[in-house]
Amino acid sequence: MAKIVKLSALTPEAIRQIVNIYHNTLGGEMGKLYHEKYLLEGIKRDLQHISTSKWRFGSRFSEHSKLLVQKVYDSPFSNFENPVVKFEFYAGERNREGRLIDSDAERFSEAFENAVDQYLTNIGLAL
């Protein structure tokens, strides 16, 4: 399971680094066009009303690929006012079991999530 982080602990710099990891791991230029403060504010705004904040950054697999920031409800660290979140990659094509259809996309998705987990652990934000 992906590492989780308190939404309130995320900083613009952490978001910028996660976007850089996305870009370096998965391709996609769109994420680099957003200012990190705008992204962080948008994520927080989205997660006040819905469980997943979706950002279409594109990737080497599809121009429709997205960075997903999802609330994690089953964590003892999470509560309504200060949720915890995880970062995932959505390539655009999944089968009925929720696995990526393209094995390369699955491999790159795991590499992205592992790199984000390592980054969050290194800066002391991973729970």
Image: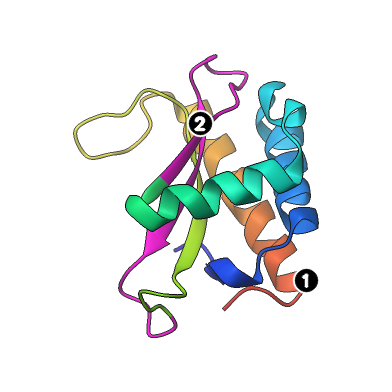
Query: Measured from the top left, where is residue 45 in percent x and y?
Result: 49, 50
Q: Which residue is mark 1?
A: 122
Query: Which of the 4 image quadrants contains residue 34?
Result: top right
Q: In this image, 73 relative to 14: left or right? A: left
- Magenta segment range? 53-77
Give the structural element (helix, strand or loop) at label 1.
helix
The residue at the point 62 percent across, 18 percent down is 60
Vertical order, 35 against 124 (above or below): above
Tell me, yes or no, if residue 51 can be seen here: no
The residue at the point 40 percent across, 60 percent down is 71
Mark on residue 66?
2
Q: In this image, 53 relative to 117: left or right? A: left
Give the Cα separation between the discs numbered 2 and 1: 24 Å
Tell me, yes or no, if residue 127 can be seen here: yes
Q: Amino acid at mark 1?
A: Asn
Look at the image and say whether residue 106 sits in the magenta stretch. no
Give the structural element (helix, strand or loop) at label 2.
strand
